[in-house]
C-alpha cells in the first residue's frame, strides 16, 4: 500500500482517473450541481456529463456501480463522513468553491406571513435566521433533500419560503424576499478505490 505525504490535498485531481462523468446532489439548481460543473470545467472543453441524484448517498452508489467516474460532495453535508470512511471510495481531491447566492424566496403573488414555514436542505439551515427579514420569525423549518427541492416546495406553496440558490429560484420562478449571499465551501471529490492498492 502506498501512502502520500501529509499536507495539501491535490486540487488538480492528478491523483485519480480522468473525469468522464460526475455524480452529485440534484435536482437542477443545487449548489452541488454548480460545483460539479466547476469541477468539469477544469478538465476540458467537452459537454459536461453531470448526473444528478436525489441524495448524495444515491450518487455514491452510482460511483460504486461505475455509473459515474467521480462524486462531488459538499463538506458541509452532515453525512460526508460516510464517504471518507467507505473503503470502496477514495478521496482524490478537494476544492473551494463559492456557491451561487443563497436567499429566502417565495412563490410570486404569495403573501409571506410574519411567521413563515421555511423549506431548506439541512446543511445551510443556519442561514435562515441570518437572512430572515427584520420583523419575521420562523414558524417551522421543513427539511428537503436539496435547496432545489426546497424551492419546489415553495413554488407549490407547501411552505411559505425556501432557503435556496439563485439558479433554483429562477428554475422554480420564485422571488427573493431577503438579501442573498454566496457561501465559500469545501467540496470533496471521490472516485472508486483501486482494489489492488
Image (cartoon, helix red, strand yellow):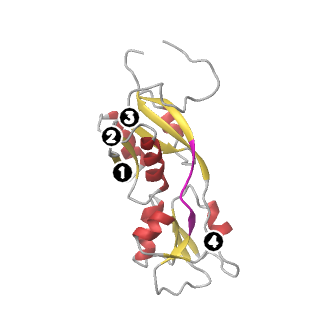
The Cα–Cα distance between marks 3 and 2, rounded to whole angstroms, is: 14 Å
Q: Secondary structure at mark 3?
A: loop
User: In this image, 83 relative to 140: left or right?
Assistant: left
**Residue annotated with mark 1:** 53
Q: Which mark is residue 94?
A: none
The Cα–Cα distance between marks 2 and 4, rounded to whole angstroms, is: 36 Å
Q: Residue furthest right?
A: 134
Q: Residue sitting at 39 percent across and 77 percent down?
A: 156
Tell me, yes or no, whether the two marked residues, 3 and 2, touch with CB atoms within 8 Å.
no
The Cα–Cα distance between marks 3 and 1, rounded to whole angstroms, is: 18 Å
**Toward the viewer: 141 or 149?**
149
In the depicted structure, whether residue 180 falls above or below residue 117 = above
In the depicted structure, whether residue 144 falls above or below residue 195 = below
Q: Residue sitting at 37 percent across and 19 percent down?
A: 195
Q: Residue furthest top?
A: 1
User: In this image, 86 relative to 183: left or right?
Assistant: left
Identify the mark nearer the N-term, 2 or 4: 2
**Residue annotated with mark 3:** 19
Tell me, yes or no, whether the two marked residues, 2 and 1, touch with CB atoms within 8 Å.
yes
Extent of the magenta region: 96-103
**Residue annotated with mark 2:** 62
Amino acid at each position: 500500500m502506498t501512502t502520500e505525504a501529509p499536507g495539501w490535498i491535490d486540487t488538480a485531481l492528478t491523483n485519480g482517473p480522468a473525469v468522464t462523468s460526475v455524480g452529485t446532489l440534484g435536482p437542477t439548481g443545487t449548489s452541488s450541481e454548480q460545483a460539479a460543473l466547476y469541477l468539469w470545467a477544469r478538465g476540458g472543453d467537452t459537454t459536461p456529463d453531470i448526473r444528478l441524484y436525489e441524495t448524495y448517498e444515491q450518487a455514491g452508489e452510482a460511483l460504486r456501480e461505475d455509473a459515474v467516474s467521480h462524486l462531488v460532495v459538499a463538506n458541509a453535508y452532515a453525512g460526508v463522513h460516510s464517504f471518507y470512511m467507505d473503503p470502496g471510495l477514495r478521496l482524490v481531491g478537494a476544492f473551494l468553491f463559492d456557491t451561487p447566492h443563497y436567499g429566502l424566496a417565495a412563490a410570486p403573488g404569495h403573501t409571506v406571513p410574519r411567521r413563515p414555514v421555511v423549506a431548506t436542505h439541512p446543511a445551510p439551515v443556519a442561514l435562515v435566521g441570518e437572512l430572515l427579514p427584520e420583523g419575521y420569525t420562523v414558524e417551522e423549518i421543513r427539511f428537503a433533500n436539496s435547496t432545489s427541492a426546497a424551492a419546489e416546495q415553495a413554488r407549490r406553496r407547501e411552505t411559505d419560503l425556501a432557503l435556496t440558490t439563485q439558479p433554483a429560484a429562477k428554475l422554480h420562478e420564485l422571488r427573493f424576499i431577503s438579501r442573498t449571499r454566496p457561501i465559500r465551501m469545501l467540496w470533496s471529490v471521490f472516485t472508486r478505490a483501486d482494489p489492488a492498492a
